[in-house]
């Protein structure tokens, strides 16, 4: 399978029409007028148009759209025979693979709700998600059996299936023995399709309620903005059980009737081999993955001529990475996307021809999205000024599963309060400067860590950087940098000199931790600054903190 067309991002004037609609009670949002009715409709539409196109490749398994749809209908019939119906929650403790994709659409076929679980979680987190969602069925990979709670701890589970042999679980393959179900359950597009538990820093994870409308809208935005179609293919290496893999990966490629190639985990060399073998045209990864491809392999050794869209998110792309990718793969368009579980993935996307010029911006709002910059009193600030980013649109979730306190705290008039500090410039480009909780307050000076990290990653030999606040009894907080570096290439003095030439004195890190191991990240690829601070012993509140000046 080889893809040679190099389509550019479509002009907004030729994009599909939008109209205002009332959804989620009292919200009025812009929606695509011509769209699939629900999540299963994404697959059924692609199958009707391109039944013989390759939909899914994983190892030795290759399924056309017609074959994938048949498997989906078989699993739907099997689940229905065991009592799963409209609105029921089906938990999925599955790694990247064919079963994840099949179950996602089979549950949607029944009008039920998928609850993808984090395979890197431990038993308490799995138990919380199962109990909080009242899941009635669980489908898991056998390798995760040890983190599944005992039956007595999950009384709502009435059916359990395992891909691979696991004591006490019915074999997943038995779900494929039923005759394909004939008629999908019709569900309103406002209906909940997926509950994704967010990895909050305090309290129990919250279950964000992704709707059919939000998923269809986000998949359509990716397809439209990136110019994706039935000749495109992706290699999914980010976890399917998180919003990026689920929406930017699975639903987006099925929406455009493209091909999904599945990798279980990311290894740079294996990824490049897979991309070359299958003529990958589109990817969505975190910047560190692109960086590792450059550090651990020679891109010139692989036929990557079809690779034309490189989506990324979670952090700014280092300037050196953009430059090296541009030289090696001149036809690759890098596109920064900003979003969250609560926005069903993209809220903004950067046009590829602007990425190098506006590296620290996350682009403009996607179609149908409204992004405002608000102060602490809930008032919009002037263009160019900083504040918290509030986001509204069809893709913003209606709230959290059975958590009215969080809904009241984090939503207002349909806007989700992101917790990110940012700004919007005169040309409408959005800048994300920091998380509220990550910003460093040094003696009243507010320091945005993303700005400092950008300066640090420009130093040759710095693979990735994280800036955190070090508690100080006098200034409140000081700037500390933790870097993953190439051995024997970077030294502290070089870093200090570079920062002094690029930053104000109060922004410059006062201490450095250099390491050869990559920084800890969550399954979405975001750096775990809280874990870094704990490892450094910085999670201790100082005795005194200065007032802001």
Image (cartoon, rainbow, N blue to C red):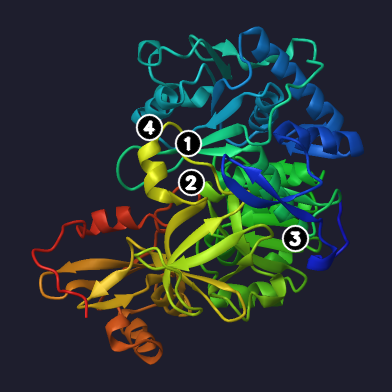
**Based on the displayed image, in which of its 4 quarters is residue 280 positioned?**
bottom right
Provide the residue designation for mark 4. Answer: 125
Asked if one can make out residue 334 in the rendered structure from this viewpoint, the answer is yes
**Based on the displayed image, in which of its 4 quarters is residue 39 positioned?**
top right
* Residue 487 rendering spot, x and y as whole percentages: 41, 70
In the image: residue 117, left or right of residue 328:
left
Task: Identify the image quadrant of the C terminus.
Answer: bottom left
Provide the residue designation for mark 1. Answer: 118
Question: Residues at badges 1 and 4 in contact (C-beta under 8 Å)?
Answer: yes
Q: Earlier in the sequence, mark 4 or mark 2?
A: 4
C-alpha span from label 1 to label 4: 9 Å
C-alpha span from label 4 to label 2: 14 Å
* Residue 271 rendering spot, x and y as whole percentages: 65, 52
In the displayed image of the protein, which residue is found farthest to the front?
Answer: 26
**Foreground residue, 235 or 90?**
90
Provide the residue designation for mark 3. Answer: 226
In this rendering, which labeled residue sits more in front, label 4 or label 2? 4
C-alpha span from label 3 to label 4: 35 Å
Q: Residues within 10 Å of mark 4 (few under 14, many from 20)?
A: many
């Amino acid at each position: 399978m080889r893809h040679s067309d190099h389509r550019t991002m479509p002009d907004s004037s030729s994009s599909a029409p939008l109209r205002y609609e009332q959804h989620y009670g009292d919200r009025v949002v812009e929606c695509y007028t011509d769209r699939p009715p629900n999540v299963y409709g994404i697959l059924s539409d692609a199958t009707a148009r391109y039944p013989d196109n390759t939909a899914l490749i994983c190892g030795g398994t290759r399924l056309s759209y017609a074959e994938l749809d048949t498997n989906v209908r078989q699993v739907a019939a099997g689940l229905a025979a065991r009592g799963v119906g409209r609105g029921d929650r089906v938990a999925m403790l599955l790694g990247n693979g064919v079963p994840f994709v099949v179950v996602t659409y089979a549950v949607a076929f029944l009008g039920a709700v998928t609850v993808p679980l984090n395979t890197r979680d431990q038993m308490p987190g799995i138990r919380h998600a199962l109990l909080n969602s009242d899941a009635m069925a669980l489908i898991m990979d056998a390798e995760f059996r040890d983190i599944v709670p005992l039956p007595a701890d999950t009384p709502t589970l009435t059916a359990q299936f395992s891909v691979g042999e696991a004591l006490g679980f019915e074999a997943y393959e038995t779900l494929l023995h039923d005759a394909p179900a004939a008629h999908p359950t019709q569900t309103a597009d406002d209906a909940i399709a997926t509950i994704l538990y967010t990895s909050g820093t305090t309290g129990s994870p919250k279950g964000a309620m992704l709707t059919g409308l939000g998923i269809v809208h986000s998949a359509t935005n990716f397809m439209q903005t990136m110019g994706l179609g039935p000749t495109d293919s992706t290699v999914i290496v980010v976890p399917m059980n998180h919003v990026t893999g689920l929406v930017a990966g699975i639903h987006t490629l099925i929406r455009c009737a493209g091909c999904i190639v599945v990798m279980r985990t990311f290894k740079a060399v294996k990824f490049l081999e897979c991309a070359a073998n299958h003529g990958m045209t589109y990817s969505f990864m975190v910047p560190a993955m692109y960086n590792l491809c450059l550090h651990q392999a020679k891109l010139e050794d692989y036929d990557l001529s079809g690779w034309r869209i490189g989506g990324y998110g979670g952090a700014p792309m280092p300037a050196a990475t953009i430059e090296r990718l541009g030289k090696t793969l001149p036809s690759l368009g890098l596109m920064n996307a900003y979003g969250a579980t609560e926005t069903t993935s993209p809220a903004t996307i950067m046009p590829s021809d602007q990425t190098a010029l506006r590296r620290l911006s996350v682009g403009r709002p996607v179609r149908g999205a409204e992004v405002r910059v608000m102060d602490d009193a809930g008032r919009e600030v002037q263009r160019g000024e900083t504040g918290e980013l509030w986001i509204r649109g069809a893709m913003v979730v209606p709230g959290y599963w059975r958590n009215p306190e969080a809904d009241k705290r984090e939503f207002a008039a349909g806007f989700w309060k992101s917790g990110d500090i940012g700004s919007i410039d005169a040309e409408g480009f959005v800048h994300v400067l920091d998380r509220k909780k990550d910003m460093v307050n040094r003696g009243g000076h507010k320091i945005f860590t993303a700005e400092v990290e950008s300066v640090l990653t420009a130093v040759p030999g710095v693979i990735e950087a994280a800036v955190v606040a070090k508690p100080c009894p006098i200034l409140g907080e000081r700037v500390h940098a933790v870097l993953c570096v190439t051995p024997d290439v970077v030294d502290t003095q070089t870093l200090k000199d570079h920062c002094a030439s690029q930053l104000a004195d109060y922004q410059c890190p006062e201490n450095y931790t250099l390491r050869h191991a990559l920084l800890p990240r969550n399954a979405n690829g975001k750096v775990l600054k809280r874990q870094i601070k704990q490892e450094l012993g910085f999670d201790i509140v100082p005795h005194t903190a200065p007032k802001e000046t």
